[in-house]
Amino acid sequence: MSAPVEAKLPLDHVAIAVTSLEEACSLYELLSGETRTKPEVLEAQGVRVSFVGSIEFLEPLNPETSVGRFISARGPSLHHIAYRTSDIVSEISRLKKNGFKVIDPEPRPGARGHLVSFLYPSSTAGILIELVQHDS
């Protein structure tokens, strides 16, 4: 008998930290042929966000936000990879039991009104990982 299959999390989106939401969205609209979503301000995270297809663009509201500091240190670049789950609370618990370090032990509101939780890059091979629950 084979081992039980662990939860499979589909890719939800990839996020890129940018200095100009307008410039990045315009470029990716031309590349992909898709239309951007209306920009959304997430005050608690200190960002403006917009999606072009499955790419989320994050523009810091000021240089002192976490995304602002990220851009200062690394320049505009990949910020995180997001995986979709239908039960974020159970998924957080499962990942913690498997040794992942969770930044948000309690899910919080994210873009588009979804619940989100992040995992520390130190436990995910150096990449910030976001869990996203759409039916929030």
Image: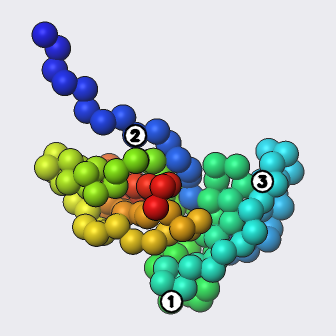
Task: Say which of 75 and 81 sits in front.
Answer: 81
- Locate residue 30, reporting x and y percent: 86, 51
Location of residue 127 (image quadrant): bottom left
Say which residue appears at 53% left-offset and 47% top-offset. Answer: 12
Secondary structure, mark 3, is helix
Q: Which residue is outermost to the top?
A: 1
| Amino acid at pointer 2 | Leu
Residue type of the residue flagged with mark 1: Glu
> Which residue is the site of mark 1?
64
Q: Which residue matches tag 3?
A: 28
What residue is rendered at 25% in x and 51% in y? 90
Counting from the top left corner in percent of width and height, residue 57 is at 64, 64
Residue under the image location 34 percent in, 55 percent down: 88
Which sits in the foreground, 103 or 76? 103
Q: Is residue 16 above or below residue 84?
A: below
Q: Residues within 10 Å of mark 3 (few under 14, many from 20)?
A: some
Q: Which of the two discs, 1 and 2, labels the residue nearer the N terminus?
A: 2
Of helix, strand and loop, which one carries label 1? loop
Q: Are marks 3 and 1 in contact (CB under 8 Å)?
A: no
Tell me, yes or no, if residue 113 can be seen here. Answer: yes
Q: Amino acid at mark 3?
A: Tyr
SS of the residue under disc 2: loop
Q: Quadrant of the N terminus?
A: top left
